[in-house]
Image: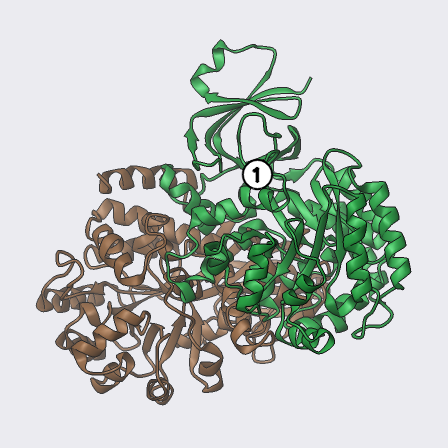
Chain colours: A green, B brown
């Protein structure tokens, strides 16, 4: 039986009161959080549980990233100092197009290893055009919680080889959705037409119709990332990007739009009235020179904002710690130093990510009855705050930490990362595989 | 005899051709780099040297930080989400004012441990008002290369307790300079009047005169960091900040100005014509909401720009890796994705830092005859680029790495950090000391 009691230093709950519980224990049974209680009460409990002592570690909810590209991990460091459209045309499209099943598998494993060892327990992945079954196989094998789906593209002026017909896209998407949506309790389908520049209106609207056959699925695409992209969208559609999506009925509470940087007032209203989820990717937005999304404004409007590391070649990591820190810091010169404080950012990376994916009843906070997705952090390092008092915990996690403080990761109560290493992967082997695959692709 | 040969995977030289040498070795004798040569030639050499095999590691010059506050390390995480003047008035001035010799010593040790384990081998430190001898003692003991000096303050409207008379400042500064300037080959004096708001004109000008008694010393202050600060400077002096410094003769090639965010054309000309050194602190500038300095413009004008982490409470770390990444990323939404590429930034953190401090003949690059200040990095991790080819090394270091990849650090050929840990410090003991000191100060 999967029955454990973990004794920890503090629990940063991310519940509605943002409670921080010092010297508490958490009881896990059958993958769920059965009880949260002061550690000193442990002795009185049923001794049938394994009692694990992590009293130097801080327990936080598993982090949620609502925009990643696992297929790109292999290309980290190979597409630097370029603008979005150049970046796609000269590097990312040719690279993704060259993926074999084997190189894709390695790329996805490298990405999952990076995400899991960094404390991310749930992702929304954009997939790639071909061989999507490989991504699902690896997600299922890794134990991560995920929405995922093939990246749909039925046109591509930037790199014509890298697209397929509208019918091929619709048919294969339907088949993959049928096979993998709700494959197990952790894996759901995220329909992923890439962006306006690679999708016909027919592909976009028929995908939205298709979603009705897959209740609980997500519609996941990019929007308003780059000025040249937005201009091209305007030329093609006569509309602003989000305005166009709204006009063809794509926007609702199951829509996740990555980026949303270059948006006007009308588009902000459209995001708000349709309960659209914004996936904010600060590292990527800076590195590609795309701009800085007006996140404080979105939050004031009550628009859902969560975080994503995007792909490894535009970041160049997949660490939620980088995204949290940057999400806070980049707003402060514009909106002042109190904007997006550490607690707000921490919630954005946990419970708000869960809400974005309609998973807030299951994950995103440490509460009795929820699934046991959580991370144990070692905050006891010289470069972190020296006080263990509650007011410092958010600052410590958001402003000082990096992924190296992640010690253990649990998903559904199962230990996925121990001593900072993924149980399922041999990191050295992954790197060696990565080098081999890359040398074949880059020939 | 101090005679070693280190065999490494690559040497990222930061020499004038930015050479990267694969499979090379470096011979160190009496603290200097005696020879750099292909590893395969090792056998033919004098066998009297210790031959050390680090062929999985990449060797880079020791990093240089031209603006830090070691005395503030103890206060990391205790001054978040505040603007500069509030941050000083409510937190930093009261904290610095409350330092005992013992708490100051612990703070400096924590800072030095953080800097050294992060690969920083040379710093320019701003010191604090009182007990400066403690900072020098700890710098001397640590083995770091440093310019340092007491922070001078003869007025303080924000927190009146935290200043001393003009005469006290001048006298004690002279005494400390006399004792510690050129105390050994690594330690020099950096005169450090804090900023206009805490220094009378007399203090500033007499300090500049005093420097003549200490050839090779540096004049180190803050400038043009925050909009309210700049307005107050304007009220007090009738001038812009840098314009005021120029008008009273403070600016020359031995002047290091931290920040330089809110500057006009005339001030940029003053920086240029006087060969002033700008210390850029991107984390701090973001976190305090100060703004983004126009670094690409400064570089176009040929103005010296180097990097600093500033103090732990406005960052909240002291890692050069964070500063390198941010220095690049924050310019890209403004100046485009090709601005401040990874190689430019790497040079800014090494040879350009050395040039800022007039140490470029001794350190800042890996060249025969220079002092043996260098760092060994482990770039072989899953989250770093999978190619070992030269074009990826800068990207790997600047965009993907964190201080955890620093494995060994040498200063003057002496190993200061081994296996990622400072030889001189017991990190657990430092943390424990820090907690004790902090609990006394915060009573």
Instruction: Decide if residue A83 is on the left or right side of residue B167.
Output: right
Instruction: Decide if residue A335 is on the left or right side of residue A165.
Output: left
B2 or B332, nearer to the observer: B332
The answer to which quarter of the image holds residue A357 is top right
Quarter of the image containing the N terminus of chain A? top right
Residue B412 image position (x, y, % from top left): 46, 62
A113 lies above or below B296: above
Q: Is residue B49 visible?
A: no
B269 lies above or below B288: below
Residue B76 image position (x, y, % from top left): 36, 49
B142 lies above or below A139: below
Identity of the residue drawn at 33% across and 88% down: B266
Q: State the residue position of label 1.
A: A364
Mark 1 is surrounded, within 10 Å at the Cα level, by few (under 14), some (14 to 19) or many (20 or more) other residues, namely many
B40 or B219, nearer to the observer: B219
Image mark 1: chain: A
Residue A434 image position (x, y, % from top left): 78, 54
The answer to which quarter of the image holds residue B160 is bottom left
Identity of the residue drawn at 85% across and 47% down: A176
Residue A282 image position (x, y, % from top left): 56, 60
Identity of the residue drawn at 45% across and 59% down: A329
- Callout 1: SS: loop
A384 lies above or below A289: above
Instruction: Decide if residue B101 is on the left or right side of residue A436.
Output: left
């Amino acid at each position: 039986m999967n029955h454990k009691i973990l004794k920890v230093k503090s629990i940063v709950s991310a519940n509605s009161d943002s409670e921080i519980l010092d010297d508490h224990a958490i009881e896990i049974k059958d993958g769920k959080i059965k009880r949260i209680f002061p550690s000193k009460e442990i002795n009185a409990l049923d001794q049938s549980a394994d009692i694990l002592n992590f009293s130097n570690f801080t327990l936080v909810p598993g982090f949620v990233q609502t925009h990643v590209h696992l297929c790109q991990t292999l290309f980290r460091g190979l597409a630097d100092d370029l603008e979005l459209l150049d970046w796609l045309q000269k590097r990312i499209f040719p690279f993704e197009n060259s993926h074999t099943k084997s190189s894709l598998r390695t790329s996805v494993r490298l990405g999952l290893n990076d995400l899991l060892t960094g404390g991310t327990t749930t992702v929304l992945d954009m997939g790639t055009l071909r061989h999507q079954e490989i991504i699902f196989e690896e997600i299922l094998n890794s134990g991560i919680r995920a929405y995922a789906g093939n990246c749909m593209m039925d046109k591509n002026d930037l790199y014509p080889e890298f697209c397929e017909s509208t019918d091929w896209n619709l048919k294969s998407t339907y088949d993959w959705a049928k096979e993998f949506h709700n494959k197990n309790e952790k894996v759901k389908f995220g329909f992923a037409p890439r962006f306006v520049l690679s999708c016909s209106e027919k592909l976009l609207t028929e995908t939205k119709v298709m979603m009705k056959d897959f209740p609980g699925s997500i519609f996941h695409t990019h929007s308003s990332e780059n000025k040249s992209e937005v201009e091209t969208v305007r030329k093609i559609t006569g509309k602003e990007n989000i305005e166009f999506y709204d006009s063809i009925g794509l926007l609702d509470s199951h829509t996740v739009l990555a980026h949303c940087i270059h948006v006007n007032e009308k588009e902000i209203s459209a995001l708000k009235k349709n309960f659209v989820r914004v996936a904010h990717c600060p590292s990527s937005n800076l590195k590609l020179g795309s701009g800085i999304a007006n996140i404080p404004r979105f939050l004031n409007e009550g628009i859902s904002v969560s975080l994503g590391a995007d792909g490894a070649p535009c970041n160049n990591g997949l660490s939620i710690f980088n995204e949290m820190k940057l999400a806070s810091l980049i707003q402060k010169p514009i909106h002042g130093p109190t904007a997006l404080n550490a607690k707000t950012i921490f919630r954005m990376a946990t419970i708000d990510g869960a809400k974005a994916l309609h998973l807030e009843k299951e994950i995103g906070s440490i509460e009795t009855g929820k699934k046991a997705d959580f991370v144990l952090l070692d905050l006891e390092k010289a470069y972190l705050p020296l006080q263990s008092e509650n007011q410092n915990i958010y600052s410590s996690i958001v402003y000082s930490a990096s992924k190296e403080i992640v010690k253990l990761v649990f998903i559904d109560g199962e230990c996925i990362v121990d001593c900072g290493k993924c149980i399922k992967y041999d990191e050295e082997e992954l790197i060696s595989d990565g080098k081999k695959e890359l040398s074949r692709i880059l020939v």
